Image: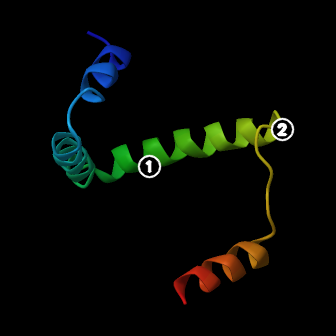
Amino acid sequence: MNVRHIQKQVLKLDVPARAKLASVLLSSLDNLSDSENEKLWAEEALRRHEDMVKGKTKSKPADVVFKNARARLK
């Protein structure tokens, strides 16, 4: 059984069941070791970098990002 198959099956669940499963899965990530966290963040950073290089995503200046974030928190 692969991840795509599991995902298709999970998406057939009702909303409360999916929410419970999501909660369990997210909680399981809280128990990762520092090295596991570092590995996952490094992989994500590489994926995002590749997307930027390929033109799939665009960057925004930090001051714009922080301005938008502050506006949303108000």
- Name the foreground residue: 12 vs 3: 12
The kind of residue tagged 2 is: Gly
**Which mark, residue 21?**
none
Q: Is residue 69 left or right of residue 2?
A: right
- Left or right: 56, with 37 as reference point: right
Q: Quadrant of the N terminus?
A: top left
Q: Count residues near mark 1 (Cα–Cα under 10 Å), then give few for <14, some for 14-19, many for 20+.
A: few
Report which residue position mark 2 lands on: 55
Q: Nearer the viewer, residue 69 or 9?
A: 9
Q: Where does residue 50 sit, x and y in percent of width and height? A: 72, 35
* Discs 2, 1 touching: Cβ within 8 Å: no
Percent position (x, y) of residue 41?
A: 49, 48
Mark 2 nearby-residue class (10 Å; few <14, some 14–19, many ≥20): few
- Against 30, is 44 above or below? above
- Does 39 appear above or below 23? above
Q: Which mark is residue 38?
A: 1
> In the image, is 36 to the left or to the right of 18?
right
Q: Quadrant of the C terminus?
A: bottom right
SS of the residue at dot 1?
helix
SS type, badge 2: loop
Marks 2 and 1, how far apart at CA: 26 Å
Say left or right for 27 vs 60: left
Q: Amino acid at mark 1?
A: Glu
